[in-house]
Amino acid sequence: MKLAKKMAQLPEQFFAKLSTNVANAIAEGRDVINLGQGNPDRPTPVHIVQAMQQATADAATHKYSPFRGTTEIREAIATFYKREYDVEIDPNKEVAVLFGSKAGLVELPMVLLDEGDTMLLPDPGYPDYLSGVTLANIQFEKMPLLANNAFLPDYTALTNAQKDAAKLMYINYPNNPTGAVATADFFEETVQFAKENDIAVMHDFAYSSLGFDGVKPLSFLQTEGAKDVGVEFYTLSKTYNMAGWRVGFAVGNADIVEGLNLLQDHLFCSLFPAIQHAAAVALTSSQDCVVEQLQVYENRRNALKDAAERIGWKIDVPKGSFFAWLPVPEKLTSAEFAKILLDEANVAVADGKGFGEHGEGYVRVGLLVEEARIYEAMERIASLHLFD
Ligand SMILES: Cc1ncc(COP(=O)(O)O)c(C=O)c1O
């Protein structure tokens, strides 16, 4: 069967390839410590699972959902943003319920851009941003995220041609893969840059709940004027370990939200109502599970720092997210280093180049295994003497 040309243009799904390599190694009977993935390892908190179980037994949830999500979830989202960020959200006009934020990331270029238009993407960045580029038949320009600018894009480094062409930009803090967090100044600069250049902004807030050392990550919508230019995408995947449930949402600019909702009216009938109910419970009930979860990741981050220091690997620890962005020994490329770790130490890490050309020189390590396994991974790596 001949598929449409667009199918051939879709980029290789980076994470699919990564998990296949790890799965093959495990199938050979090897004890792989998987630091390459971004899949939360802990279960969804019990009270959310119970809310789901009860809702599933209620026949009212077996029907089609309202197209734009239930009133309950839209109101819960507004309550959540007011409580967590002191941001007012109109549940009827400023919320789009998403099948996980990934769906929204891929939809948004189709909503805002015409074929051939241009958007700005961070490099390194979350690989699935590229799927939206291909499916919408648009172009993209890179915004390098470099260590010397705290892994924030430097808007002054963009050319006039890039700024004139761009109609949409994606930013993401706490950042995957670098673990950087955004400052209020940076968000203010972003709003100004967007207004001056007429560029819509999507802030991907996937790691919203994961700010270390007592610093709570800022919502982009806390910035004055943010709603004039953009939206924020939120996912329950990481905050509540609900990655398999596929539930997220967009909040912010009413025109962009309307566009997303309109597109989704044609693609879906929203999520299983029981999932929407469980998500509303997650957002509005006690957040103790979120606090406890943050402590788990912070302990793992501290273990990574300690273990890396012991083996002479000089690293900067992340300020947020559950990823660390670690420099590769100078004599090796990121891909070579990642391959050696998997082949010779049974430790899987993500090759930094998979996140873009500016990821060269780094690997991404996920804090998604127990502390003891982090120490063990570092000891295995030490036995390769790559840092001597
Ligand atoms: C930066 C970033 N954005 C979005 C997502 C997608 O999250 P989901 O589709 O589960 O909401 C991820 C998942 O790993 C991510 O790392």
Image: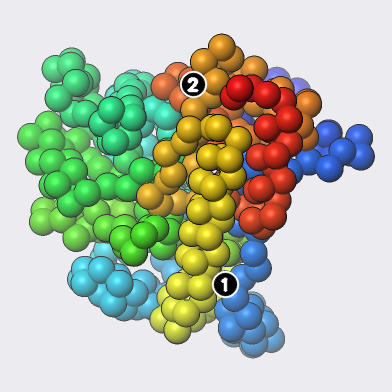
Q: Say whether disc 2 or disc 1 marks the residue closer to the N-terminus.
A: 1
For residue 102, side relative to residue 338 (left or right): left
Q: Is residue 62 visible?
A: yes
Which secondary structure, mark 2? loop
Residue 256 position in % (x across, y down)? 27, 50
For residue 211, side relative to residue 38 (left or right): left
Residue 103 position in % (x across, y down)? 49, 48
Q: Which residue is mark 2?
A: 361
Q: Residues within 10 Å of mark 2 (few under 14, many from 20)?
A: many
Q: Residues within 10 Å of mark 1 (few under 14, many from 20)?
A: many
Seen at 78% across and 26% down, the residue is 344
> In the figure, residue 169 lies in which quadrant?
top left
CB of mark 1 near ligand 1 (< 8 Å): no
Q: Judge whether 297 appears above or below 347 on screen.
A: below
Q: Judge whether 44 appears above or below 210 on screen.
A: below
What amino acid does circle 1 point to?
Ile
Q: Judge whether 207 appears above or below 113 on screen.
A: below
Q: Which residue is mark 1?
A: 275
Q: Is residue 247 visible?
A: no
Tell which of 190 and 66 is nearer to you. Answer: 190
How many marks can you see?
2
Pair 2/1: label in front: 2
Tell which of 273 and 250 is nearer to you. Answer: 250
* Residue 163 numbered mark, or none: none
What amino acid does circle 2 point to?
Gly
The quadrant the N terminus occupies is top right
